[in-house]
Image (cartoon, helix red, strand yellow):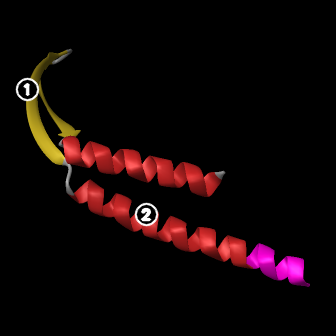
Amino acid sequence: MNEAYKAVQLLNDRFIELDLLLKDFDNLLSDLKEIHTIYEGENGYEYGEIFTLDEDGIDELRKIYYRLEKIIN
């Protein structure tokens, strides 16, 4: 029974970590910068959008990735 309790506790801890990570990722998505582009496509000039992050956002994304990797492993 003690082993089962430890397993459930470990799953609960990982769930909490994953929940926090997803909240951080959602916050990061709100920091995306939208760039409007016009490019020459198959049907003439077309309108497009590019989404990007500044350097701080890229660092945050990298931290989120490493946290996710730690949760998975």
Residue at the spot x=44%, y=69% of the render?
Answer: 20
The image quarter containing residue 16 is bottom right
Q: Secondary structure at mark 2?
A: helix
Tell me the CA gap for discs 2 and 1.
33 Å
Question: In this orientation, which residue lies closer to the viewer: 12 or 46?
Answer: 12
Residue at the spot x=75%, y=77% of the render?
Answer: 8
Residue that label 1 marks: 38
Q: Amino acid at mark 1?
A: Ile
The verdict on residue 43 being magenta is no
Q: Dot 1 surroundings within 10 Å: few (below 14), some, or many (20 or more)?
A: few
Q: Amino acid at mark 2?
A: Leu
Q: Secondary structure at mark 1?
A: strand
Would residue 8 be found to the left or right of residue 72 on screen? right
Residue at the spot x=44%, y=63% of the render?
Answer: 21
Q: Main structural element of the magenta stretch: helix, strand or loop?
A: helix
Would residue 41 be found to the left or right of residue 61 on screen? left
Q: Is residue 53 visible?
A: no
- Total numbered labels: 2
Quadrant occupied by the N terminus = bottom right
Residue at the spot x=49%, y=54% of the render?
Answer: 67
Find the magenta span and give its range. 1-8
Would residue 63 be found to the left or right of residue 67 on screen? left
Q: Which numbered tag is attached to residue 9?
A: none
Tell me residue 40's x, y (percent). 12, 16
Residue that label 2 marks: 22
Question: In this orientation, which residue lies closer to the viewer: 16 or 36?
Answer: 16
The verdict on residue 7 being magenta is yes
Tell me residue 2's x, y (percent). 88, 83
Q: Which numbered disc, 2 or 1, marks the residue that appears first in the sequence? A: 2
